[in-house]
Image (tube, rainbow, N blue to C red):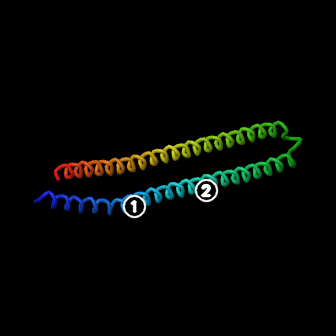
Amino acid sequence: MTTEERLYKLEGIVEGVMATLPGQVTSLEGRVDLLRQEVKAEIGALRREVEEKLNGLRQELKGEIQSLRQEVKAEIGGLRREVEEKFNGLRQELKGEIQSLRQEVKAETTELRGEIQSLRQEMAGLRQEVKAEINTAFNKLMLYFTALAAALAVLTFLR
């Protein structure tokens, strides 16, 4: 094979590589965009889920507190003089229950914050992975271009 034939062959290879690169870069950009959209959708869904759970807990707490208040008022109305000491005991129990419920809500909130933080860290990891994939693709592209430049330089020198 002559130098000219080799040069034409290399030019064909270069044209083939140049023709496929934009498509591959566009494909990679599309996949990155899809990944971003999926992560955003997941975060949005998790936020909605957390909000729904918190609202549900608030409603449950309101319902339980309202129910307890009604029970206490009924007890007090019928037995105020007779069970004043017992009423004080119930009041302390209610405070303990409410405090316990508050602590449970705080624990749930802390756990949810931890989960959100974990999701943020996971997102950051995914971002790093995507960046690494992009960098690898660009590094390979630069190697191809370098090899191509070297081959063209050698062919130019051999002419």
Could you tell whether 114 is left or right of 156 in the image? right
Which residue type carries mark 2? Arg
Q: Residue 151: x percent and y percent?
A: 22, 51
Could you tell whether 112 is left or right of 153 in the image? right
Which residue type carries mark 1? Ser
- According to the picture, the residue beneath numbered tag 1 turns out to be 27
Specify few, some or many for label 1: CA neighbours under 10 Å numbering under 14, 14-19, or 20 or more.
few
* Residue under the image location 66 percent in, 39 percent down: 103
Whichever of labels 1 and 2 marks the residue nearer the N terminus, that label is 1
Observer-nearest of 157 and 83: 157
Q: Quadrant of residue 128?
A: top left
Q: Which mark is residue 48?
A: 2
* Residue under the image location 56 percent in, 42 percent down: 114
Q: CA distance from mark 1 to mark 2?
A: 31 Å
Observer-nearest of 64 and 15: 15
* Residue under the image location 14 percent in, 57 percent down: 3
Q: Residue 144: x percent and y percent?
A: 28, 51
Q: Which mark is residue 58?
A: none
Observer-nearest of 41 and 66: 41
The correct choice, above or below, for 38 with respect to 153 in the image is below
> Which secondary structure, mark 2?
helix
The correct choice, above or below, for 98 with respect to 6 in the image is above
Q: Residue 25: x percent and y percent?
A: 39, 58
Of marks 1 and 2, the one in the foreground: 1
* Residue under the image location 39 percent in, 46 percent down: 132
The single residue placed furthest to the left in the displayed view is: 1
Could you tell whether 130 is left or right of 14 in the image? right
